Each structure stands twice: as structure tokens, then as C-alpha cells.
Amino acid sequence: MKQPLRKILSLAADPRGQRDDEKERAVRDFDRAHRQAFFQGILSMIRWEPVDLLPFETVRQRLRLGSKSYLGVQEIPLDRIVGSLSRYEDFTRTFMPRKTSSRRRWENIDRLADGGGWPPIEVYKVSDTYFVLDGNHRVSVARQLGADRIEAHVWEYATRVPLEPDDDLDDIILREEYLEFLDDTGLDRLRSEQSIILTIPGGYWELEEHIVVYRHWLGLAEGRDIPWSDAVAIWYDTVYAPLIEKIQAENILSFFPGRTAADLVVWTLRHQEKLERRYGGEEVLPSQAAEDFAERARSNPLRRLQAWIDRKFFGKRVS
């Protein structure tokens, strides 16, 4: 770090007494951080929030990360460091130390903060998140001391799907499904602005199946065979994107904290099929299904109560 995280003690102070004070403070800092790790584990079970760091190798394999490029030394946000190459079991998601076996090294790093800091750490960047290659203890001490940023050598891996700071291993599996969806549809090449983030396992398969059915009926309506890429692009422009706008206009997401607009698209398309069966096969437009779905959510007191509980007690955010 360029600047010490704590003020350097007066040069007039007794050197031996100063070293003793630094040692005692480092002991207290570690004990405090270790307690925080324990309580974060308890709180995560109550609030269903990710407490574990992501293992980089798992992310690399599931997201099929290829070559990396060096971006130089940068100051990176500490709260966007979400994983580690090898120490992902030693710290919590906020890098509080879980194991007392790391005490000596942690305290040595802590004492260095009084004298001007330490060399830059080394990280891999994936989307807007970072994984520690070298410097886990430095990150942990910096987080405990209240720093916001840290210097790092940064290597970036390109990825077709985004990672968020609060993603857990279940989200990584969903990102893998997203990759398969993009492989099958080519949507990211057809519509570069697309961002279909689901929290529903199997949701991408449902969307792809909907495109298949949509292509079939579009071909019957136009009396020709519709190329797959054309059907994907037309589906996105005439079904998916308008549904996203409708969901946002109806403010449906406020009744489903922790879910995404793409989740609501999947549920709306399911609801559309349900309504068409109820009305004996009569066509129901996606926008009509969204309006009906929104009205049912607004008029359901249990849904409103659940949304309030999710926000108030489980900390779930409205996207």
C-alpha cells in the first residue's frame, strides 16, 4: 500500500515499548477478526448470504476461462475480492480469518501496516470480481483495518458471462448454464447488450425451449423455414426485451426480492402457458400474462408479507 493504514507512532517513543504495543495490538486485531469470522458464519445461516470464498479453479473450469492478460498494478476495491486460488477455506467472504493456525502470519502482516504497508498483492480479475493469487493475509488485514482499496498486480480473464460480488457456488453453476445457453443460441453475438441473469436452475433451458416453439409458429405464420439465428434475434426483440420492459413498468420485482427480471420472464412465460390452457387454447399475449401475473402478486397478502420478510430479515435486495 502506498500509505500506512495506521498512524506511525511517535519516533520519541521507546522502541521496545513501541514494538510491544504493536504486538499487543496485532493480537487484539486478529482476535477481533477471528470472532467476526465466527459470527459471520452464524449470520449467513440465518440470512442465507454467501460466507465462503469462491475457489478460483472451480470458477475457471465452469466458466471455461482461457488466456489471461496483464493489466499492471492497480488499486482495486477490497469488497470485490470474492475468492482465492488456494486459501478459499481459510477466510470468510470478507476475508476474516477462520483458522487460528494463520495467527502468526496474520499478526506479522498486521504489524507491517504501522510501517508503511506491504507490496502489492496479485489477483486474477473475472468480470468485475477478483481472486487472490498471492496476498490473502494482506487482504484480510486490510479488511480488518477498514481499508477500501488495495494495490494489486492484476491479470484479467475474459468471460462471456458476468460475475457479481455476492455470487456463490450455486450462482457459478447457473453461469455455466448461461454459457451453454449462449453456445446454443449465439445470443451474445446477435445482441451484444443482452444480459440474462437467472437464479432459477433450468431456467435457461426453458427459455431455449420457448425459442424453439416460437420459431415453429413463426415459420408457420410466414410460410417458410426460419433460420435459427433469425428466430433467436426476433424472439429477443419481440418477446424477451418487451417482457423485461413490462415487468419493470409493472414493478413486479418489488414482490420478489432476490430475484431478477429474467427470473420473472421465465415465470411469466410459464404463466402464459397456464392461462392458455385455462382458456381452452385461446392465445394469451406475453404482455397480458405479465399484467395478470403482476395483479395476482399485488393482490396476494402472503406474497406481500413474504417480500417484506425477505427484505427486512434476510437482506434480499430488489433488482
Image (spheres, rainbow, N blue to C red):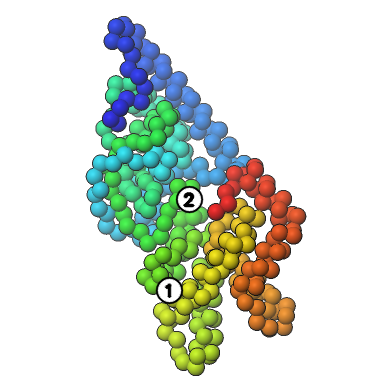
Q: Quadrant of the N terminus?
A: top left
Q: Residue at x 69, y 51 (%)?
A: 306
Instruction: Give the answer, above or below, for where 36 lies relative to 232.
Output: above
Q: Earlier in the sequence, mark 1 or mark 2?
A: 2
Instruction: Give the answer, above or below, for where 284 lies relative to 149.
Output: below
Instruction: Give the answer, above or below, for where 12 lies relative to 185.
Output: above
| Residue 185 badge | 1
Percent coordinates x, y for residue 4 in the rendering: 32, 25
Amino acid type of the residue that numbered disc 2 sits on in the rendered structure: Asp
Q: Residue at x 51, y 28 (%)?
A: 35
Q: Residue at x 28, y 48 (%)?
A: 155
The residue labelled by disc 2 is 167
Percent coordinates x, y for residue 93 in the rendering: 46, 41
Q: Residue at x 71, y 55 (%)?
A: 303
Amino acid type of the residue that numbered disc 1 sits on in the rendered structure: Thr
Give SS at disc 2: loop
